[in-house]
Image (cartoon, rainbow, N blue to C red):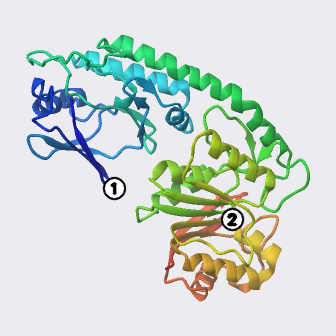
Amino acid sequence: MKNDLKYYLNCIIKRYPPEAEFNNMSSLDNELFTLEKFSSGGKNPYCPKVFRIDNTTYAIERYSFNLGEHISINKNNVKRMFFTISYEEFERQIDEILSWLKNTSLNHRDINPSNLIFYEKEKLIKLIDFYWTKTFGITVGTPGQLNWFYKQDDFNAFKQIKDQIKVVWEDLRKSSDNEINDIINSIGSEKYYDGSSAQQGMTYHPITIPGISNKFHVDSSKLVKNVIENISIYPESAIDVGAAVGNFTFDLIRNFDLKKIYAYESDPHVNKFLKKIKSTYFLNELEVMDTVDINTDFPEVDISLMLNVHMWIHKQVGREGCDKITSNLIKKSKLLFFQTCGSESPGQYIIKDKEFTSKEEIEKYLYSLGAKKVYYIGQEPIHGSFRHLFKIEGK
């Protein structure tokens, strides 16, 4: 079988040239028919969304990556999958895919890593390429080289792939657990860094990577969810000022197909942790940056986050320097999410200037720094009270 693929922002266009060898042994009609059976009226979460264009062409929703090639897994892609789900979750999903095939009386016959694709946002594996799938009442040919490595028995093909991927998971745990845990245990060991952990081995936010457990000060999961839900554009680039252990950074990576995200973190141990995660899980879009100061030249991006770090910058560089940094960030961002510690909020360092005494004063402050439009999202609970969360239109 031969096909042509074209990639777009939200979909992939796939065409089967009718003149290509073996393509006449099946048809797009068969693929779409068996896909519809597998979908079970849209109830199957492991079936991708597909839209027919003509007799040889269809569009499939854009996915993050596949798990390998026709004859081998891609270890880097598999490790990237384990950035979001565990091996146990991977195995559970594969078993459910096999159950859906059985329950819909389908023999896929082409189960291999290139046809298992991972959607980071949904945290789901999906099965594609039903061109050679057999079911009752359908006659489909069989090219001599069809899935020659993993073979045409779906159960055995899945078993072989699971065994190969389990080796990657075990190697990942052996090679990285000690190193990553050593870095986590070094956090808070030398001195206190503003806005970072005040206790050795305890991070400020939870680490949201399977297989890595940690003690943390603040559960920021609701704030992360609120920010993600209020992103009104589809970003390709982002900045996270005061990224900590990546709670916000990692979810931006998972939810959007970012070309680049810049994570600024001044605590050297936390910074080292982010760099280790980048290399371990092949987060090629992630750039780990150092301290923000008045000379920082921010890149132009779609989305920026300045969440509960503004007050620490105020403490370190003073009001004038803090205003310059914040203004520069607003001007370099299409959208900026902003939260700080003013007089209504508890915290280790509270900004007592008049501009931070209420949400109305903070709005005026943000406009004074160059914001084109300031949206008030609401009060976010933290440390037994609340802080105001804003979305700002910048450049």
Q: Position of residue 133 (x, y in %)?
A: 20, 22
Decide if residue 115 is in sight here: yes
Badge 2 local density, few (<14 within 10 Å), some, or many (20+)?
Answer: some
Compared with residue 326, is residue 119 higher up or lower down, i.e. above or below?
Answer: above
Decide if residue 357 is in sight here: no
Which amino acid, mark 2?
Asn
In the displayed orientation, state which residue is furthest to the bottom: 368
Image quadrant in which the N terminus is located: top left
Residue in front for this viewpoint, 368 or 387: 368
Q: Position of residue 95 (x, y in %)?
A: 41, 19
Q: Which quadrant of the structure image shows residue 208? A: top right
The circle on residue 308 is 2
Compared with residue 265, is residue 52 higher up or lower down, i.e. above or below?
Answer: above
Which amino acid, mark 1?
Leu
Q: On the rendered structure, is 126 left or right of 173?
A: left
Q: CA distance from mark 1 to mark 2?
A: 33 Å
Badge 1 local density, few (<14 within 10 Å), some, or many (20+)?
Answer: few
The circle on residue 9 is 1
Q: Position of residue 41 (x, y in %)?
A: 20, 33
Which mark lies nearer to you, 1 or 2? 1
Residue at coordinates 64% horizontally, 31% vertically from top-left? 211
